Amino acid sequence: MSEMEFESTNNFGGERPRRTTVRTTGILQNNLNTTLTAHIDLVNLNDEPVEVRVQVLNWGTAVTQTNPLGTLLDVTQTLAANTRTALNAAVTATNHYEVRLIVGRNGNRENVLLTTYGRTSIGGGQVNGLSVLPSQLLTVEIDGCL
């Protein structure tokens, strides 16, 4: 992770580990027999640039998985005001995956929107059932976020 500051609860007095506010899709599964592209559209509707971090985590194929097996995409960047950008990550057949968004303290996180959907390839058709709209993202607090 870069040196930028993300909204978090600091560990004052050793009581709690650092907590980070994360918006997540929850766990999705590539139910195709081939690799799919997790396409991510990210837009900053603020009048100021904002620092963001987008991750796509690989949760593997196991029925029970304790931690992500790896990171398929981890991008930290400054997104200019009123700007959209697109990102893509390859997800192996039958793997579970999660898309996470963390917005830096310098921005109004409610005005940074993420939409994600599965595609058969970069520029290919959308896969039914793998679309997550901004209103469907869950906001969670994660200790020691990746």
Image: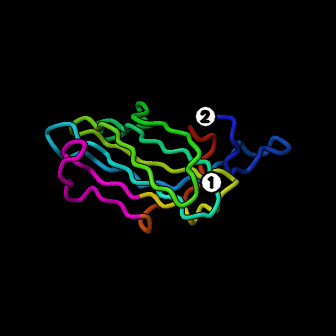
The quadrant of the image that shows the C terminus is top right
Considering every residue shown, the one lying at the far top of the view is 70
User: What residue is rendered at 67% in x and 47% in y?
Assistant: 6
Residue 127, magenta (yes or no): yes
**Image coords of residue 70 (percent x, y):** 42, 31
- Residue type at the position of mark 2: Met
User: What residue is rendered at 65% in x and 50% in y?
Assistant: 104
Query: Which is more foreground, mark 2 or mark 1?
Result: 1
Q: Which residue is mark 2?
A: 1
* For residue 129, side relative to residue 40 (left or right): left
What SS does tag 1 mark? Answer: loop
Q: Foreground: 48 or 122?
A: 48
What SS does tag 2 mark? Answer: loop
- Tell me, for residue 15, which label it has, or none: none
Q: Foreground: 129 or 44?
A: 44
User: What residue is rendered at 60% in x and 63% in y?
Assistant: 46
Considering every residue shown, the one lying at the far right of the view is 13
Considering every residue shown, the one lying at the far bottom of the view is 135
Q: Earlier in the sequence, mark 2 or mark 1?
A: 2
Give the residues in magenta.
115-133
Q: Quadrant of residue 106?
A: bottom right
* For residue 141, side relative to residue 87 (left or right): right
Q: Which residue is mark 1?
A: 49
- Residue type at the position of mark 1: Pro
Q: Quadrant of residue 18?
A: top right
Secondary structure predominantly adopted by residues drawn in magenta: loop
Q: Residues within 10 Å of mark 2 (few under 14, many from 20)?
A: few
Residue 95, magenta (yes or no): no
**Image coords of residue 44 (percent x, y):** 53, 59
User: What residue is rendered at 17% in x and 52% in y?
Assistant: 125
